[in-house]
Image: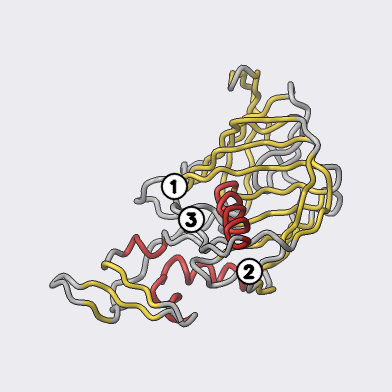
Amino acid sequence: MLILLCTICNCAFAQLPPAPQTLEQKRCIDTTEVECVYSFKFRFNRNAAYSEDIRKVQIGRKYIKDFSYVVFYYDSLATERMKKGLQSQNIPSQTYPCEITTDINTRSVSEKYRLMLNAGVLCYTTVTKPFDWQFIDADTMIASHNCNKAKLFFAGRNYTAWYTTELAVPYGPYKFYGLPGLIMRIEDENGLFVWDLNKVEFVQKPIYTYTYENEQTCSATKAKQIIRKMMTSPMSFLQSIGTKMMVRRSDGSFGPPSHNSEQQAYEPLELE
């Protein structure tokens, strides 16, 4: 049982990152032909400041894998430290802790969402339908590339994408695909989720899928329910997985948390 001592602060709990995992159980599923690095700025609460993640997108012939390079970096450290009998280092900032592996032919999407601390890894599958992009006349320069513009309604949100036909790769970050060129930038109309391409390389690297401790297979609907509970009622969520909570009160003493005012605003990336 983990005993967590915290100062009362509603926003702090939802920011807790997952614990690092080791990368020893892995399987090669494809070979990368194009590797992209995106900066991903996101806010799950419109009144909150942006968090920023680094997303790597590995594009092969059979699969596309999108994952947090920050989480991967600390997983790699944990793997090496474990071999030396050392404790792993905590992930210092909030990321989007979800690995997304898409089968290019079937559009089946396997997701592994890392819950906060040691609460487990949700494993679920969805299918992405063909996107109905609306093309817009525009000519914009992004990172020395001529870019065109397109709009999309996806999972309850309206997006605008800027893509370049100078790089004839019909993919982008997250689950976005189907444009006649690589997505350089994409954002939702409320500015809650913004991806910017930082780097693209044509390389040959293996694409691995990893098996983590405490994986929990469930439906996508169930996963969304669990993640919502974690994000909106983090103290209740932590207690439900056996974490003993002690918070510092205004008088300096410690005691069990009160859930009267715990509910937090949360806007998931996918509304539908």
Q: Quadrant of residue 133?
A: top right
61 horizontally vs 214: left or right:
right
Q: Which residue is mark 2?
A: 122
The picture quadrant where one finds residue 223 is bottom right
Q: Quadrant of the C terminus?
A: bottom right
Q: Residue at x 29, y 81 (%)?
A: 256
Q: Residues within 10 Å of mark 3 (few under 14, many from 20)?
A: some
| Circle nearer the N terminus (2, 1) | 1
Which residue, given by chain and number where applicable, does mark 3 sit on?
A: 91
Q: What x and y, as percent, mark residue 265?
A: 39, 61
Amino acid type indicated by mark 2:
Leu
Q: CA distance from mark 2 to mark 1?
A: 22 Å
Left or right of 12, for residue 157: right
Tell me which colouring the rendered structure shows.
secondary structure
Secondary structure of residue under mark 2: strand
Q: Secondary structure at mark 3?
A: loop
Distance, label 1 to label 3, CA atoms, is: 14 Å
Instruction: Tell us which disc is closer to us: 2 or 3.
Output: 3
Report the Cα–Cα distance between label 2 and label 3: 19 Å
